Each structure stands twice: as C-alpha cells, then as structure tokens.
Image: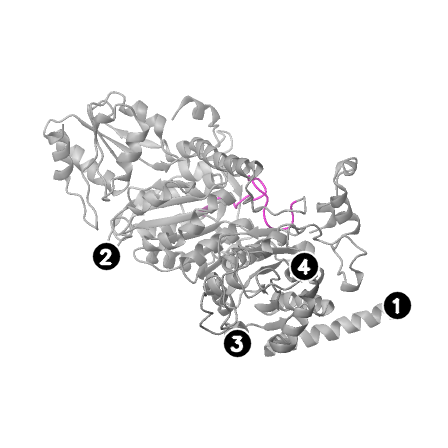
Amino acid sequence: MSEEVKESTEPHVRKDDPRSHVLSDPASKPEDIEEKKGAAAQRVVDPDYLFLEAPREKEFITGSEAAKESIRRANVDIAIAYPITPQSETMQQVGYLYAEGYIRDYYRGEEEIGVMSAVAGASRAGVRVLTATAGPGLMRGIEAIAAWPGGRLPSVLLVMCRVVNAPLAIQPDNVEISYLLNAGGIVLHGENQQDFYDYPLIAFMVSEKPEVSLPAAVAVDGFFVTHARNWVSMPAEDLKLPMRDCYHEAVPMMDNENPPIRIARDAPIQKSNFISYQMHAAWQQEIWAAQERSKKWLSRWLRGLIEVVNPKAKTMIVASGSAVSQSREAVRQATERGLDVGLIKIKSIRPFPTQELNEALDHAEKIVVPEFNYIGWLSKELKAAIDRTDRVFAGPRVYGGMTMPTEMIIDAITNSK
Amino acid sequence: MSLKTIEAAPGFKDYLPQEYKDLIDDGPFLKQRKVSELGSFKEAIEEHPMCSGCAMTLFIRLVYVGLPSIENTVICGTAGCGRLAISQGAVPFVYGNYGDTNAVATGIKRGLDIRFKEQNKDVVVMAGDGGLADIGFHAVMHSWFRKEKFTTIMLDNEVYGNTGGQDSGMTQKGMVMKMAPTGKKFEKMDMLGLAKTAGVAYTARLAPTNPTRVANTVRKAVLIAREVGPTFIQAYTSCNIEYAIPTPKVMDDARAVEKDRYQFVEYFSDEAKAYWDDSEKERKRLRKAAKQSG
C-alpha cells in the first residue's frame, strides 16, 4: 500500500465506540426481527469494517457457495440470471437468496445480450445490480458490456471462465478475460474460493464510488474455483453493505428526479465534426482516468493490487487466477530444491498494477508467467508494463480445460534462458 | 417528480435559456395537455434534425402530448431515425445499443419500481421497425412474455431509413429495397398477432391521420401498462425519402395506406378491458363531481 493510500485511510472504528461501524440496525423491536427475513434482519455496516475488520469464521465451501455468501452481504437490489455452465449454480444460489428475502428482485433473462442490456437499465435506474456469465455467454453479451463503462454504470458481473472458441467445450480456460481488457470496466481476477467471497463485495463498493462510477467484473477460473471446495473465512451473515447511493455518482440517474429536465444522457454524437470527436475522446479519457482513481480503493480493500511472496528472489513468477495457486505450490517445491523463486499474484487486471509490478520486479533477473490460456494475455500485459522485457519467459501455458502441473512451472524456472 | 425539481433557483432563472424557462412556465409537465392545445404551450419537442415532411416526427410530437405523466416518463430508443428527434425531447431518453430497448426498459422499470414504491414511473420504448421487429425482436417478445409493465411503440416506416433504405421485417413483400434487390421475399411481419399471442394487455395499430386518436391511444397504452401489463402500439410513420413520397403528399399517403392496410385497430386483454372500463367510469365520475362543485 502506498503512502498516499495510507494518508487517506482513516480508522473507522473509534476506540471509544465499539459500535461506530454500524450504520443502521435492523428493525428495533425483537418481534419485527422475527417477522422479517433476509436483508431486513441484517445490519448495515461500514465497508471498511466488513472488508478489513469484522471477525471471521471459516467454512469449507465451493466457489459458487462463496459467491452466494458474498452476495448475501452485498445488499443487492436486483439480480438478473441466465444459465451457462459453469456459472449456473452461482446464479441459482443467488435466486435462493432472493427467495429468502436478501435481494429485492430477480429474474431469468432471455439470453445474455438481453441480460447485459437489462443490467444497464437497472443501473441507470439507480439500483445495485448483479449478473454472471461464462465463456460464450460473455461473448454474446459483450456489445452491451462494452457500453457499460461509457454509460458510467456501476454493476458487478461475475465471470466464471470457460472455453469460448470452437470446438465448443465447457472446460476452464481464461482466454475470455482478454476480451474484457479493453472494454473500460474494472476487472478483478480471483485465485480461489476466498477471493470469490471477498472480491464481489469490494467490486460493488469500488464500482459505485463517485470518482469511479464504472462497472466491475470479478473473474475466476471455472470449475477449479466454482465447483471445488476450499476454506473460506467470512464475517457473520447478518452484516451487509450500505445501499447504493446513486445520487453521488458521475452521471445523473434516469429517474426524472435530476434537474435539468432535458437529459439525453446518451446523446448521439455521431456527427462528423470536431465537437463530436472531442466529446468522444474526452469521454474515453475520463473512463480510463476513472480506472486509475479506482486504484486507491482497490488497494485499500484488496490489501494491495498485488501480493508478493519471497520478494527478494531473483526469479519471480507473475500470475493471476488459478495459476497463482499452482505457482504457490511450485514455489514451495522449488524452495525445497534450493531454488530462489518468488511469486507475484495480480489481483486487479483492470486497472493494471503497472507501478506496483515495476517496483516488485525491478530486481528480478527472470520472470515466469504461467497462464491458463493459449494466447498468453497476461504475459503481453506484463511486457507492455515493465522494462527489460527480455527477462520475461512467457509461459508455461495450459488451455482447453487442463490444469497446470507444478512441474511445468519448475521446468520454466530452471530451463528457460 | 415535483415541478420544484426543475425550477431554477431564485436569481438564476434570468440566466437560463428562454426555451428552458418556457418549459417550466408553460410546458407539458404535471398536467395532461390536449392535442387541441398544440401551438398554445411549450411542447416537449420543437427543434429537431428530421427530414422535411417526416410523418414520424409528427407522430413523435403527438406521443409527447399523449403521455399521461410526461414528467415521470423515461423513453428508451435505439439506432434509427426516431432517436434523432426523441433525443431532442425534454424527457429523459436512453439511447442504448442496437436492438436492446426492451431489455434496457425491463431493467429501468424494475429498478424504478424498487426505488419508487409510492410513485408511478412510466417507461416507454419508442423505436423503429428494424429495431423492434428485427434486431431487438427477442428482447421485445420476451419482455411481453414476462409481462413487463411498460409500453412499446413501433415507429413503422417499413424501412431502415437511417442507414439508407434497406428492407426490414416490416417491409411489405415484393418491395425492391437496398438489401432486397429483386424484391423482399417474405410477408410483412405480423407483430400485432405476435403481441396477442404473447399476452400483451393492449395492442393498437394506427396511422397519424387523426392526431387526437394518436394521443389518446398513447395515453391509454401507458396507463394500462402501468396497472396491467405490456402494451404495444404499431404506428405507420412513412419514410418520405426512401419511399419517394413528395413532401406535400405525406399525409395523403398516410390516409391512403390507412385505408388500404393500416386501419385503426385495438385489442384489449380481458384484464385490460376491465381495468380500462373501470378507470373510465371513475374519470367520468370525477369530471362530473368537479363540474358540480363548480
């Protein structure tokens, strides 16, 4: 965490008031609490408290269940679902939350472009909105997804990565993240079930910050994370985030409550003149500036945009998603063999932690980038962000659904250059 | 929305454009304007970049008059000629992606219903035949099957006018268009039949030959959508450019097409009919009571 962030981080729990993190309590009368289910029985707490301070307990659950527990605490207004493997189970679980009263509206949409468009509508109306998709579903919805940032539409999209190209397959392969890199939204890439609990909550809060006002995607590798069990530590389920504060965002809501009356918020600027060019150019610049501004909040709540293991090692592995877990094991095995190897986990792909990586890799003589996709989007991103790119060994890679044996990573460490 | 939301702060009003001041002082907000009043109040739309003689523009102007609560209405559109006018209106307008109108409207309507439980917020989709019957077809149909409570208005000029004259699903069979070089091969899509099949509460087809009817139909459709379920208006709004209709003959064409194949029809579901009859009775009773009390 940089000095600048530390300065802005004020303690939210006052030592003399143990309840200062509670922003609002559930219904005050005990009999009301008994009547009220779900969200009505939860306490709204400060995001800092929920993310960084609240006591946690561990459960052994699947990634889909971890996402469900995240959404339970996210104070979501509307969730819009559409089935696709391996995502379906998560949005079914979210549906159960709706049935239990934790979410105010929920429906199964017609297909992904309809779903992603409805997400845009709901976000314009000022409510907190969630959806999820995977692989071909992301491709189908991407016209709408790529328009969310320009609409300055906060929302959270869960992405359970799977193969997107032919021949059709349902297996994990995170090539689909590469299609999100230039869309303008925030993209977090979770390593495991714990991240799939933590990241969506953080994503909602960052997405809705006035200086950010961008959609956020939380990606994990399908099956490895969604369908496997792991230990996840979570605060109590009667805590939730504050509701969306839609009048403190970058653009007015489409609810007729904002002056001036003449709002064509999405005015066509297709005329061929310099005012149109300038408008569009400025708008794009502002989206990417908002990405930069999100770093402050992401750093604070993710406890850094990157995590570094063995920071002084001469060979550094740089990875995101499931490749991080395999790399952790590879580092352990390599260390047993007496090799000097470290690891950087990249948590946020957009915004990309360029400065943090340059600082953490300045000393490195060799950089290995294991990936779960054929095209190697992360190694390309990394090479564009650091100097002395001849240090980068752009691999190993697995794709089409394979997991990555640790031997492949160790081979890359020992055999490359 | 309260009129206070749009009123200028004291001292600031003098610096606002005259157009804005007129909208506050003598605009369409918080009162139901009538077609017969046109010309005597500040309309939601006046200046626009549409072609001379465009029937679609006349129709859109009448839609704004018909909206029962224009100050609480959000309009969703998509690419096409219509949005060039609609985006100039004093009503919040979402210009989304290609053919996404009824999905976006679903999200907006449901979102506003969550946030405004005590206040009606009307959502109206207004887009072309290509936007609704072709590229946005699945979203239109599914919003109807899901019984989403908003109105869909099709500006049917039977052509992709904005892209330069390609045939749409609503073009008549046999017409030679830019992407039907030997004539369109299949019939005009029966959107009214599809609406009925999908369980739309109120469906109407009309041409803009009778302005009062247009405004009344829009009002009816929006009020029924508010209380009962999805409503659909299919309006003939000719493209005088692509169909080479001389500007002075645009209304002659509208009358001829209306007589030939675009007669006014409306269809109520049983529930919508019961609701509408009851609300008409209530309105009559209120009018009578108001008269008696002087």
Give the labeled residue for mark 3: B193
Q: Are marks 2 and 3 in contact (CB under 8 Å)?
A: no
Residue that protrudes farthest toward the right in the picture? B294
Mark 1 Cα-neighbour bin, 10 Å: few <14, some 14–19, many ≥20: few
> Disc 1 marks which amino acid?
Ser
The label on residue B293 is 1
> Disc 3 marks which amino acid?
Gly
Cα gap from disc 2 to disc 1, whole angstroms: 76 Å
Return the chain for callout 4. Answer: B
Give the labeled residue for mark 4: B53
Q: Quadrant of the C terminus of chain B?
A: bottom right
- The percent position of residue A347, horizontal first and vertical second, equals 33, 36
Picture quadrant where residue A288 is located: top left
Q: Are marks 4 and 2 in contact (CB under 8 Å)?
A: no
Instruction: Name above or below for residue A390 compared with residue A85.
Output: above
Mark 2 Cα-neighbour bin, 10 Å: few <14, some 14–19, many ≥20: few
> Disc 2 marks which amino acid?
Pro
Q: Earlier in the sequence, mark 1 or mark 3?
A: 3
Give the labeled residue for mark 2: A167
